[in-house]
């Protein structure tokens, strides 16, 4: 009989048991000392919730809209590379789970299934994440392919001019498979290395000259809304607005890029204040509980994205595992809303949480 799983964290241990060590380490790992990796989770724990009582919570409505699309709850599946490392059905299984749970999936540029396979397998609402390689023609082609098969937005990841230092991957000599989206366009093998070493590939292929001026180039190749993923400061949020982007994802890439960058939940509010409602702000990093989603919404996020738990669910139980991860987080959020006196997403306000900063300020 399958082991009873009661929260999404428990999928990690199953994933660790079923996956080859190098794959598990790649998924679970963070940059250098993994300070930010721990902080992404711990910073949520330092926030508390201020529940309100005697509110009619006999019906809880978690539904919301994201860029105008109706979704069942304020959570999306973060773009994470190479789902076939976790399960043979890869991103197709993940997309089917997203469709079943009526949440948005963001497909990674580094996906193992093709953009067309993921588009045709189900009716999930899909966004497409991109990296910009030195070969810009590849992004142009992939964005056109994604647009023509119904992806609804482009998510430009801006925190990866080079890959962070992930020491487990160095020890394990983690390599990339040939990604089928790029077949005939680009080999994953790199000149500096006989193998498709993840870091060597990224450092050689990604365009480190990418800058704010390039957003207008991206605009020129797509009609889709553009979200930027990887903003951690108010200054950059303002630059993003000046570049006329359509949404911001506050993210430190799941702590895989710059170690000692701040926990995302700790900078969310600064960015929300800078944006002043001009565009939606989303966040990811360390979201493992419904209470975490509630806290992010209270600080002004319109929705959160979930990274590792989705891959762990996929590794443990395929499509059904991803569905369980989504449903567990939704159920926990629903309970949190009921116990906090918030019958709808719009009822979750800044007054419903206390942050570390609030506590420090109250002492002054
Ligand atoms: C295995 C793995 C692969 C990832 N691949 C990508 C990617 O291809 N593109 C991207 O923008 N972010 C990528 N990310 C970062 C996620 O989109 C997201 O920011 C992060 O996982 C959120 O943190 P969490 O895992 O704590 O939920 C990846 C993260 C992981 C764990
Ligand atoms: C293969 C990597 C570039 C995918 C990624 O973004 C990550 O591992 O964080």
Image (cartoon, grey):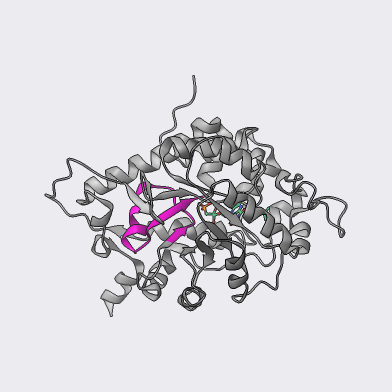
Q: Is residue 128 above or below residue 263?
A: above
Q: Which part of the image, by quadrant, shows the C terminus?
A: bottom left
Seen from the viewer's position, the closer of residues 36 and 139 is 139
Q: Is residue 206 left or right of residue 155?
A: right
In the rendered image, residue 298 lying in the magenta stretch gets the answer yes
Q: Is residue 234 above or below residue 338?
A: below
Q: Residue furthest left?
A: 54
Residue 166 in sight: no
Tell me residue 349's x, y (percent): 26, 61
Q: Is residue 76 left or right of residue 14?
A: left
Seen from the viewer's position, the closer of residues 297 and 275 is 275
Give the residues in magenta: 282-306
User: Which residue is pictured at 21% across the width and 48% down the height?
Assistant: 343
Seen from the viewer's position, the closer of residues 204 and 217 is 217
Residue 66 in sight: yes
User: Which residue is pictured at 26% across the width and 74% down the height?
Assistant: 362
User: Which residue is pictured at 66% across the width and 71% down the height?
Assistant: 210
Q: Is residue 158 above or below residue 285?
A: below
Q: Quadrant of residue 16?
A: top right
Seen from the viewer's position, the closer of residues 64 and 122 is 122
């Amino acid at each position: 009989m399958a082991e009873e799983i009661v929260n999404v964290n428990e999928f990690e241990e199953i994933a660790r048991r079923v996956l080859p060590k190098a794959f598990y380490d790649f998924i679970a790992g963070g940059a250098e000392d993994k300070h930010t990796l721990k902080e992404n989770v711990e910073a949520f724990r330092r926030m508390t919730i201020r529940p309100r009582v005697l509110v009619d919570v006999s019906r809880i409505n978690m539904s919301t809209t994201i860029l105008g699309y109706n979704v069942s709850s304020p959570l999306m599946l973060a773009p994470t590379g190479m789902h076939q490392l976790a399960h043979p059905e890869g991103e197709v299984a993940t997309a089917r789970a997203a469709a079943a749970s009526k949440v948005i999936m963001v497909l990674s540029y580094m996906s193992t299934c093709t953009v067309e396979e993921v588009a045709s397998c189900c009716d999930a609402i899909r966004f497409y994440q991109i990296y910009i390689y030195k070969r810009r023609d590849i992004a142009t082609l992939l964005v056109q392919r994604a647009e023509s098969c119904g992806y609804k937005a482009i998510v430009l990841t801006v925190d990866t001019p080079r890959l962070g230092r992930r020491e487990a991957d160095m020890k394990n000599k983690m390599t990339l498979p040939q990604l089928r989206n790029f077949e005939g366009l680009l080999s994953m093998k790199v000149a500096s290395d006989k193998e498709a070493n993840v870091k060597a590939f990224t450092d050689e292929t990604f365009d480190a000259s990418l800058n704010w001026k390039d957003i207008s180039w991206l605009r020129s190749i797509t009609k889709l809304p553009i979200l930027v993923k990887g903003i951690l400061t108010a200054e950059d949020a303002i630059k993003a607005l000046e570049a006329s982007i359509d949404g911001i994802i506050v993210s430190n890439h799941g702590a895989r890029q710059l170690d000692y960058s701040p926990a995302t939940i700790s900078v969310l509010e600064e960015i929300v204040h800078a944006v002043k409602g001009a565009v939606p702000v989303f966040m990811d990093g360390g979201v493992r509980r419904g209470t975490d989603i509630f806290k992010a919404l209270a600080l002004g996020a319109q929705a959160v994205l979930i990274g590792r738990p989705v891959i762990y669910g996929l590794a443990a139980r395929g499509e059904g595992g991803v569905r369980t991860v989504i449903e567990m987080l939704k159920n926990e959020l629903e309970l949190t809303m009921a116990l906090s006196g918030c019958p709808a997403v719009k009822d979750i306000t800044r007054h419903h949480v206390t942050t570390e900063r609030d506590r420090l300020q109250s002492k002054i």
